[in-house]
Amino acid sequence: MSDSFYITTPIYYVNDAPHLGHAYTTVAADVVTRYRRLMGQDAFFLTGVDEHGQKVMRAAAARDMTPQAHCDDLAEPYKALWERLDIRYDDFIRTTEPRHQQVVQQILQRLYDEGQIYKQSYEGWYSTSAEKFWTEKDLVDGKCPDSGQPVEWISEENYFFKMSQYQQQLIDTIEQNPGFLRPESRRNEVLGYLKKELGDLCISRPKARMNWGIELPFDADYVTYVWFDALANYISAIGYTADDERFDRYWPANVHLVGKDILTTHSVYWSTMLFALGLPVADCLYAHGWWTVEGQKMSKSIGNVVNPHLLIDAYGSDAVRYFLMREIAFGADGDFSHRAFQLRYNAELVNDLGNLAHRSLSMTERWLGAVVPGRPQPTSSDVALEAMAREVCQQFADAMDALQFKAAYGALNELVNAGNKYVDTEAPWALNREGRRERLETVLRNSLEICRICAVLLSPVCPIKAAELLSKLGIDGTPDTEKIWRFDGLETGHAVASGDPLFPRMKELPEVIQQALEAMEAAPKAAPAKKKQKKKESVVSEESTEVTPLIEYDDFAKVALRAGHIKTAEKHPKADRLLVLSVDVGEPSPRTIVAGLAEVFAPEDLVDRRVVVVTNLAPRKLRGIESHGMILAAGGGQIEGLVDLPDTVSPGAVIR
Ligand code: MSP
């Protein structure tokens, strides 16, 4: 394994406030970087912002500011959010920095001198709102298909990069390097796109039309911005053309992380730019999926619900990072729901990991003088546990190498569960009662070792909590990561302390989140999430890239579904949208369930119906009444009907 490692995120448009989508990619890059450092590699992590273009220019004018002052102002919220999310980047590139502009100009000059950039008159329907040219057949009712705004016929001269000449080289590169475009489905998508003839790339705009870009060194009447400018950040930041040893050390990058919407621009434009410069492409271009929020597309109407700052205030940065990496497979789309957050947090961080740590440490405190015990004589169950730890560490490493964060942390969770099972089976409380001191020491030592391994594996995603757990275990600073899995990582005789639980249980969603959810529910509904996401800035057309989010069977099995019989129903005294139901789910007394069904059903329509109830949701207070479950209904934003069961099904019957 080479010693150096280089990972990048896209550079984000300054005009957007940083949102969950930006946080997702940046957290993923940070997790990879921390993991690589843990493995002893010299990892370099680049992020930054994309600052040129018409939208920035207009927004600055609207604020009565120069574009530069406007950009200076808007780059800050990104840095501030990364700080709060514990992102440890090595460099933050801004496309208005001289170091970047110089590289872009040098590249342009070189390619122009070599005849790889040429000037040609260009005609087409131009949409100022989308900053794109369209052909006649692209237009919808004579208007821009992206923005719906009027277009104008423009005939102007522009500069073009001879991208078309690299089509075959690009196809060969993708075909010969199976790991280059990931996941696999995206690779096929790009290869499919490359079956059509590749055109040349327009890389300039006349200053008369737009001047907030980088001036072409060979024609002062033109600027370049958007892709040709932005993509070069990956090499300008590490000192391409500047005789910087960082360039020799880190290029080619190991991983470019991008969202699925900007995969084509990266795989086609960026790769061919590199070919033209005679530079190797990155080892891997990984396109991740998109998040929806509470089943809706991210848009103004969801308001604050996933404002990253609100999430950090409510849950803490470690828990947010954990959820983002653990909830959906990297590459697939998925939904950010606060209920799912609460469920996963309580299950894996509080009940599983937090519990293992707390019980192991507090028993050591109580019975073994709060010091790490020795391991006198391992039995076969101890050896089996150590072997499992070894296997999990391997699975974890394989998954992290493949950027499969969900699987990596799934493996960690299995180790935690094995640790808890070991404690249950070995029953240290019985050993203590029976005075079997040696065995008690071995068992607690092994449980503490499992906690140490878990803390180390957890550290890339939850750096603060991992350090807290290590410190409880008597390890300050960086733990030894040589053979993490071995049960001799702790120092016998070192002091340990259980302290407060690592992750406090979340009984109800935090007040700020409940308010944000209520505000979201009150707002007009956004388009249902399943519709195709609007295409983003891209000259090429990108096919729909929806991937149905996949979950593990274990995740599904966590949801307990039972048949319910609605006994009574009445209006909620404080909320027009809600009904308060009493539902028999086969338990000694009926449950109170508060449901958002009042807009579609009168209370009397519901009495005596047999429905499907989710029975293991944590209770939640809705306008003052605690709800103990959820009734399944069909329909997205608008309820279309309940999931009914025949009268023959008795209350409490398990649904699978
Ligand atoms: N400036 C360009 C990138 C240039 S890189 C040389 C850009 N910026 S962006 O700010 O619009 O988007 C940045 C990233 O955010 C993209 O990777 C995009 O996929 C990601 N996301 C935007 N919304 C998202 C979600 N709802 N979910 C996950 N990621 C999303 O494009």
Image (cartoon, helix red, strand yellow):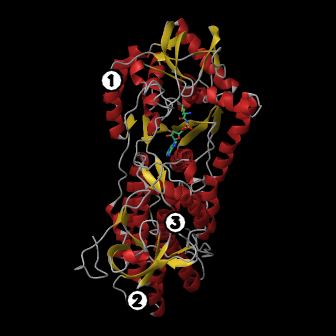
Question: Which residue corresponds to mark 3?
Answer: 452
Q: Is residue 64 above or below residue 517?
A: above
Whether residues under marks 3 and 1 lie with C-beta atoms below 8 angstroms apart, the answer is no
Residue 174 sits in quarter: top left
Question: Which residue corresponds to mark 2?
Answer: 589
Q: Earlier in the sequence, mark 2 or mark 3?
A: 3
How far apart are the two marked residues, 3 and 1, measured between alpha carbons? 46 Å
How far apart are the two marked residues, 1 and 2, measured between alpha carbons? 67 Å
- Kindly state the secondary structure of the residue where label 2 is placed: loop
Badge 3: residue crowd in 10 Å (few <14, some 14–19, many ≥20): many
Q: Is residue 350 visible?
A: yes
Residue displayed at 47% across by 34% down: 262
Amino acid type at mark 1: Asp
Question: Which residue corresponds to mark 1?
Answer: 172
Q: Is residue 363 above or below residue 127?
A: below
Q: Nearer the viewer, residue 71 or 531?
A: 531
Q: Is residue 555 above or below residue 434?
A: above
Mark 2: C-beta under 8 Å from nearest atom of ligand 1: no
Q: In front of the other: label 2 or label 3?
A: 2
